[in-house]
Image (spheres, rainbow, N blue to C red):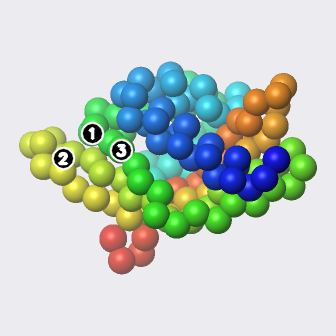
Amino acid sequence: MPTEKIAALLDDWSAALASGDPSIIADLYAPDAVLLPTVSHQIRLDRGQIRRYFRDIMMRRATSRFVEVHSRLFDTIGINSGIYIFKMHRDDGTPFDLICRFTFVYMLLDGAWKIIEHHSSVMPDQV
């Protein structure tokens, strides 16, 4: 599978985030995935925790745009890393952007690419 196919997995993730349904995005993660989230101190270690994290993010009407992507493929492991921008809304409805770094690690499980590790952090100049 060319690395373009691994990069295209980010489109699925963005669409799931924009859906507003936390179950859709949680389904992209393996049952034992690890999420080091952008706006939480708690590491998420199972589907329920991941779903709850994204439920809270989706309440802010979050969308994402990938601006720099580096993709690699190692047999049944795929990696996307780079920079993305989250557009979210404050409680008063005011939109704001967070520029973040990311790494998604995927594993081919039962014929489907699932996220097994996801690390996202705000760029240092944003804090």
The amino acid type found where label 2 is placed reads: Arg
**Residue situated in front as seen by the camera: 15 or 58:** 15
- Residue at the farthest left position: 92
Query: Which residue is at a point 52% across and 56% down the rendered structure image?
Result: 120
Q: Quadrant of the C terminus?
A: bottom left
Circle 2 SS class: loop
Query: Which residue is at a point 62% across and 43% down the rendered structure image?
Result: 9
In the picture, measured across the screen, residue 112 lies left or right of residue 16, that is right
Circle 3 SS class: strand
Q: Nearer the viewer, mark 3 or mark 2?
A: 3
The amino acid type found where label 3 is placed reads: Thr
Q: CA distance from mark 3 to mark 2?
A: 13 Å
Q: Is residue 53 visible?
A: no
Label of residue 100 in the image: none
Q: Position of residue 64 (x, y in %)?
A: 40, 49
For label 3, the residue is 63
For label 1, the residue is 60
Q: Is residue 6 visible?
A: yes
In the picture, measured across the screen, residue 110 lies left or right of residue 58, that is right
Q: Position of residue 117 (x, y in %)?
A: 68, 47
In the picture, measured across the screen, residue 27 lies left or right of residue 114, that is left
**Residue situated in front as seen by the camera: 26 or 5:** 5
Q: CA distance from mark 1 to mark 2?
A: 7 Å
Which of pointers 3 and 2 lies earlier in the amino acid sequence?
A: 3
In the picture, measured across the screen, residue 107 lies left or right of residue 70, that is right
Q: Position of residue 48 (x, y in %)?
A: 55, 25
For label 2, the residue is 90
Q: Is disc 2 surrounded by few (<14), some (14 to 19) or many (20+) residues within 10 Å?
A: few
Cβ–Cβ below 8 Å for labels 1 and 2?
Answer: yes
- Residue at the farthest right position: 75
